[in-house]
Image (spheres, rainbow, N blue to C red):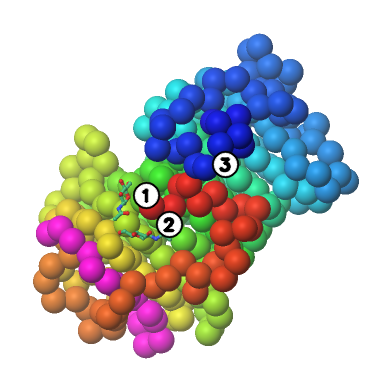
Amino acid sequence: MFTLSTILGFAALALATSRTSAPSGALTVGSSGTYSTIQKAVNALSATSTSSQSIFIEAGTYSEQVYIKALKGPLTIYGYTTDTSSYADNKVTITADKALADESTDDETATLRVWTTNFKMYNVNVKNTYGSATSNGQALALSASATGQGYYGCGFYGFQDTILAETGYQVYGHCYIQGATDFIFGQAAAAWFDACEIAVLTASLGYITASGRASDTSSYYVINNSTIAAASGATVPSGAFYLGRPWEDYARVAFQLTSMTDVINSAGWSEWSTSTSNTEDVTFAEYDNSGAGSKGTRASFATKLSEAIAIKSILGSSYESATYVDTSYLS
Ligand SMILES: *[C@@H]1O[C@H](CO)[C@@H](O)[C@H](O)[C@H]1NC(C)=O
Ligand SMILES: *[C@@H]1O[C@H](CO)[C@@H](O)[C@H](O)[C@H]1NC(C)=O
């Protein structure tokens, strides 16, 4: 992918190319790599260099929690794969099982905690296997806790609070995102999800997003050209899931050009809880969705858009040249 896209100057995504060896200069993780764990490679990065750095992870399952502190320059993580275009053939998995029951913040439960900016990650699966719990079951796969982050061809697996899209500008392209409760959540990010597969787990009631936008800020989650369906093997009653509920009362989320099966309730969106509705100032928007889950009478606090939201209005007019954006993963 590197030589082809560099030499020819176009995105090689459609060619389903392989990435089975380390790009030049990358630190390597795996049985024939320099580092045995991802954290050891992260710790070996320069914290003072402003140059681009990268890590290549060999095929394998890595049972560890990974914390990436703020670096001075860009960082890219590449997973081994024979098909860079999607998550479907990913061979690298990072897995852990921490939950809020044992930690003091949501972030500290995440299998992958990314606190650096100008960050990209390709073809890595990130799992939190804690599963369901009745209390303090927040168990994140990813904590995306700095601005300027892009995730491409990645898989995120959890049950409650899978992805914390917390702050700044973020892109998720051609990713798989699985969960049951509030599994795309956070407070301040402007995040664009494109061509993602959103998969819901067995539950009688569930929520995809939980926006914690607490005032009139630029935070917005936009899900574009994606799919929503039951995860493979999951049993989900018709209408069990909502597109979102408002964690805070300026919650703002849009689903557009997205197909959804009947797992989505005809009301589309939910109150936060019966005692705290939080719905007065929400923006819960849709445009041109399809499938059984897009039909029916939406909640009174839902918005029907007359045109699609443009990516520039979310990520800024110069998003295409931003370090964290790989436009070849935007549909
Ligand atoms: C939507 O995304 C899919 C990839 O999941 C892509 O194949 C398709 O071309 C996209 N649709 C449009 C209209 O761009
Ligand atoms: C959003 O999805 C539509 C297809 O449904 C696609 O044409 C458009 O390029 C997508 N936007 C971005 C920024 O990828």
Labelled pair 3, 1 in contact (Cβ < 8 Å): no
Residue located 60% across and 20% down the image: 21
Question: Marks 2 and 1, how far apart in space?
Answer: 6 Å
Q: Which residues are magenta?
A: 275-292
> Does the residue tagged 1 have its C-beta within 8 Å of any atom of ligand 1?
yes
Q: Amino acid at mark 1?
A: Cys
Image position, residue 30 (x, y; %): 63, 18
Pointer 2 and pointer 1: residues touching (CB < 8 Å)? yes
Above or below residue 101? Residue 13 is above
Identify residue for label 2. 193
What residue is disc 1 on? 196
Q: Is residue 311 above or below residue 142?
A: below
User: Which image quarter: residue 75?
Assistant: top right
Horizontal and vertical percent for residue 207? 32, 60
Kind of residue sitting beneath label 2: Phe
Few, some or many residues within 10 Å of mark 1 (<14, 14–19, 20+): many
Q: Which residue position is annotated with label 3?
A: 9
Sequence-wise, which precedes: disc 2 or disc 3?
Answer: 3
The secondary structure that most of the magenta stretch takes on is: loop
Residue 84 appears left or right of 33 = left
Position of 40 with respect to 326 (left or right) is right
Please tell me which of labels 3 and 1 falls first in the chain: 3
Residue placed most toward the observer, 102 or 285: 285
